[in-house]
Amino acid sequence: MTQEPPRRDNRQPVEIRPAEISLKEDERLDDLQRNGYRIIQNPKKFCFGMDAVLLTGFAHARPQDRLLDLGTGTGIIPILMEAKYGCAHLTGLEIQADSADMAARSVALNGLADKIDIITGDIREADRIFPAASFDCITCNPPYMIGEHGIANSETPKAIARHEILCTFEDVAGQAAKLLKPGGHFFLVHRPFRLAEIVVELTRHKLEPKRMQLAYPYADREPNMVLLEAVRGGRPRMRVEKPLIVFREPGVYMPEIREVYGY
């Protein structure tokens, strides 16, 4: 069994034994098209989107790396990162107990309990949960929207996942900077309308943007996602990769997207 990074407190992973794996009310089991892996989700709460999948295609990791996913939701990113890159150990941190429970059951269902930990905890307190500079890579698909504007109920799982109710991007960048090893890589997906703010926050925390890619729903539309890689303590110089077009036409993925999904 791979040894996990030591923790600073006595918080324990969400542990699910295979015999206890079952679907709860409104949950469904989805095929991830990778290594035979499946994931438990609840459409009434929150399901992963294309942004999380594209992030795992944009990111990269080595077999010896230890990876942390901040705000892991139902665990889609660590599960796919394990499938694609076979990291030594992966950890997902999630504040919502129901989502963390689904993630832990998915990890156990896929036989990955010895490689992936799911921790219930607050991103803003991540540096109290994990030792400083203990991860080679950090991934994050953070809430995109600022504050609670337009939210009918700020306590719903979907609102928490989409809006900066429980954490801000400043919180995310600050914690990533503390938990990455020098030279470690931070991968995130966000919305282009916040790009200027994101770059400012990254550089303020000594996370130097090194690679960027804009994702477009169609070739003739504006981009609706931006993928970024930053390096802790890296030198200033960023490469902008060719645009990523998602759909050739409605319902038909471009070849690059099919490759990311693993079809």
Image (spheres, rainbow, N blue to C red):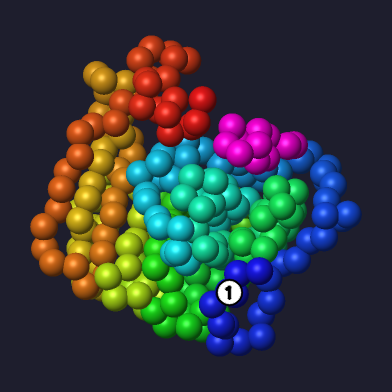
> Is any atom of residue 43 visible in this view?
no
User: Residue 142 location in percent, x, y?
Assistant: 44, 55
Q: Is residue 218 left or right of residue 57?
A: left
Q: Answer above or below: position of 123 versus 237.
A: below
Between residue 142 and residue 115, name the one nearer to us.
115
Looking at the image, is 69 positioned above or below residue 152?
A: below
Instruction: Please state the horizontal and vertical placement of residue 103, each as a whole percent of the image.
Output: 67, 54
Please, what is the three-letter code of the amino acid marked with disc 1? Glu
User: Is residue 216 visible in the rendered structure shown here?
Assistant: yes
In the image, taking residue 177 as reference, residue 84 lies left or right, namely right
Q: Residue beneath label 1, please?
A: 4
Indicate whether residue 29 is drawn in magenta: yes
In the rendered image of this protein, does residue 263 appear above or below residue 31? above
Element at label 1: loop
Q: Nearer the viewer, residue 128 or 181?
A: 181
Residue 138: image location, x then y, percent: 41, 63
Find residue 28 and report its horizontal and vertical position in percent. Answer: 74, 37
Q: Which residue in the rendered view is the most extreme toward the top? A: 249
Q: Quadrant of residue 20?
A: bottom right
Segment colored magenta? 28-38
Query: Is residue 33 positioned above or below 221 on the image?
Result: below
Left/right of residue 142 with respect to residue 82 in the rendered view: left
Foreground residue among 52 and 125: 52
